[in-house]
Image (cartoon, rainbow, N blue to C red):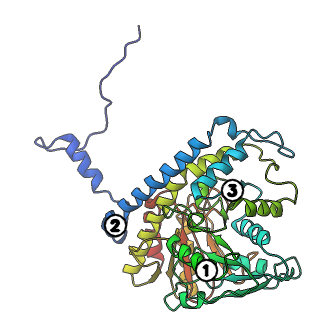
């Protein structure tokens, strides 16, 4: 006969004084083992109020995502892959597009593995809007490096930039405080300005990222000058950082990458475009071909499940990344480094920039992050030329998904002011551990 015992398991015991309960001694012993260096531990203890605020944001955004999944009637059959043309797809594309559109407050969305980067998705959106003779106006200063050849700001060697197709380009410099120049923006549009591009995140610029409220204010100013001017928001690194998204304040299209915020560290690839249906359809035609629409393209294997699961987890993962930015800013500012955003100020994206001031310190920072990564910790990142970037760039990304910046990573261009841009992290404590090695290296 089998006899089951409900006796407690026996654990190794500590040497205790007779008057002290064992459990108290064990708790005391564990509490004395701190995984963080003192500077990080002090910073983490001081950020409890900010962390509680992030938890509230996560709950708000998670509620919105859950409701969208329920309204789209997401079921396990939606996770099935498809092959070939994708005509026998089991409804997952439609359900995912519907849920994503509701989450960001858009009329329509296209979420696809065939977008292989955020730059690709943004390019499809820009080509959806613009035709020869039109003008693209960047209202938040210079765009991210990888868009320079797309626009024609940097020579694309005749490979099909907007400039090659007769689209003009102009950009408005930022104000002295690093934000939008509101005075200049009020009279910036010309009769042939067809599209205004707003980059939500800082990119590789030493500036503040834009809040959704600021984006909404800019859209109102643009539409007052010309209601037919279309507004495109590069939403990379901004998803779920606030409780609202740019389509909710009037953006015509937004675009981004699934290996950033909305993929929740789970999506293996892909990107999205969302906004007004007419323009989402036009972006889809740029991705595929006119006439094919959104109801084609295979997604083999387990990718659809990863897309749904990643999107559901995204608010939580973004919350952890935001906590990581608070911690990086607090620790590095305490050591005298300039940081952007400043410690404890509200966040508008998941990027924390630290100005290191020299090539050597930028390399040392990235090498320390790579050593503290779960993948490729034994490798040394080397600065070099990367497709789409004008300067040498160094990347530290020991991530499970290649190039994922929703996972803990950092990078930076090898140019003045030698700033490193930190982002991602599945839990803020990972940044706490990484910072210990960073401080030893600088």
* Residue 148 place in picture, x, y as percent: 74, 81
Mark 1 = which residue? Answer: 224
User: Quarter of the image holding residue 115?
Assistant: bottom right
Q: CA distance from mark 1 to mark 3?
A: 26 Å
Q: Tell which of 361 and 226 is nearer to you.
A: 226
Q: Tell which of 39 and 328 is nearer to you.
A: 328
Disc 3: CA contacts within 10 A as few (<14), some (14-19) or many (>=20): many
Residue found at x 74% / y 54%: 113
SS at badge 1: helix
Q: CA distance from mark 1 to mark 2?
A: 41 Å
Disc 1: CA contacts within 10 A as few (<14), some (14-19) or many (>=20): few
Mark 3 = which residue? Answer: 109
SS at badge 3: strand
SS at badge 2: loop
Q: CA distance from mark 3 to mark 2?
A: 37 Å
Q: From the viewer's perspective, is the residue at label 3 or at label 2 nearer?
A: 3
- Quadrant in which the N terminus is drawn: top left
Residue 385 visible in the current orientation: no
User: Quarter of the image holding residue 145?
Assistant: bottom right
Q: Tell which of 51 and 196 is nearer to you.
A: 196
- In the rendered image, the vertical position of residue 281 relative to residue 336, given as above or below: above
Mark 2 = which residue? Answer: 47
* Residue 362 place in picture, x, y as percent: 56, 81
User: Quarter of the image holding residue 252?
Assistant: bottom right
Q: From the viewer's perspective, is the residue at label 1 or at label 3 nearer?
A: 1
Mark 1 vs 3, N-terminal side: 3
Q: Tell which of 88 and 402 is nearer to you.
A: 88
* Residue 397 place in picture, x, y as percent: 61, 66
Mark 1 vs 2, N-terminal side: 2
Mark 3 vs 2, N-terminal side: 2
Q: Identify the mark at residue 151; answer none if there is no mark.
A: none
């Amino acid at each position: 006969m089998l006899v089951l015992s409900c006796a407690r398991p026996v654990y190794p015991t500590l040497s205790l004084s007779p008057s002290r309960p064992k459990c108290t001694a064990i708790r005391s012993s564990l509490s004395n083992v701190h995984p963080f260096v003192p500077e990080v531990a002090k910073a983490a203890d001081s950020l409890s109020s900010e962390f509680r605020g992030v938890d509230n944001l996560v709950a708000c955004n998670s509620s919105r995502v859950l409701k969208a999944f329920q309204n789209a009637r997401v079921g396990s059959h939606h996770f099935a892959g498809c092959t070939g043309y994708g005509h026998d797809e089991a409804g997952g594309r439609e359900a995912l597009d519907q849920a994503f559109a509701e989450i960001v407050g858009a009329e329509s969305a296209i979420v696809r593995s065939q977008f292989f980067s955020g730059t690709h998705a943004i390019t499809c959106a820009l080509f959806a809007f613009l035709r020869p003779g039109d003008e693209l106006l960047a209202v938040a200063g210079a765009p991210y490096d990888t868009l320079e050849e797309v626009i024609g700001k940097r020579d694309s060697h005749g490979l099909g930039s907007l400039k090659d197709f007769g689209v003009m380009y102009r950009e408005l410099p930022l104000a002295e405080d690093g934000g939008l120049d509101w005075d200049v923006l009020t009279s910036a549009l010309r009769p042939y300005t067809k599209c205004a591009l707003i980059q939500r995140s800082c990119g590789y610029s030493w500036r503040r990222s834009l809040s959704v409220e600021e984006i909404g204010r800019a859209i109102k100013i643009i539409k007052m000058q010309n209601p037919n001017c279309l507004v495109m928001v590069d939403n990379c690194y901004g998803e779920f950082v606030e409780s609202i998204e740019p389509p909710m304040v009037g953006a015509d299209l937004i675009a981004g990458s699934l290996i950033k915020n909305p993929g929740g560290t789970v999506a293996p690839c892909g990107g999205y475009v969302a906004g007004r249906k007419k323009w989402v359809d036009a972006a889809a035609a740029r991705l595929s071909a006119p006439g094919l629409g959104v109801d084609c393209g295979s997604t083999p294997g387990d990718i659809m499940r990863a897309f749904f699961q990643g999107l559901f987890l995204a608010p939580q993962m973004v919350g952890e990344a935001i906590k990581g930015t608070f911690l990086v800013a607090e620790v590095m500012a305490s050591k005298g480094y300039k940081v952007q955003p400043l410690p404890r100020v509200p966040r508008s994206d998941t990027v924390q920039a630290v100005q290191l001031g020299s090539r050597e310190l930028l390399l040392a920072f990235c090498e320390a992050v790579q050593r503290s990564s779960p993948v490729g910790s034994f490798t040394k990142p080397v600065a070099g030329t990367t497709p789409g970037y004008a300067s040498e760039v160094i990347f530290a990304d020991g991530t499970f998904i290649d190039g994922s910046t929703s996972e803990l990573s950092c990078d930076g261009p090898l140019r003045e002011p030698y700033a490193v841009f930190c982002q991602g992290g599945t839990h803020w404590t990972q940044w706490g551990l990484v910072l210990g090695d960073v401080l030893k290296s600088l």
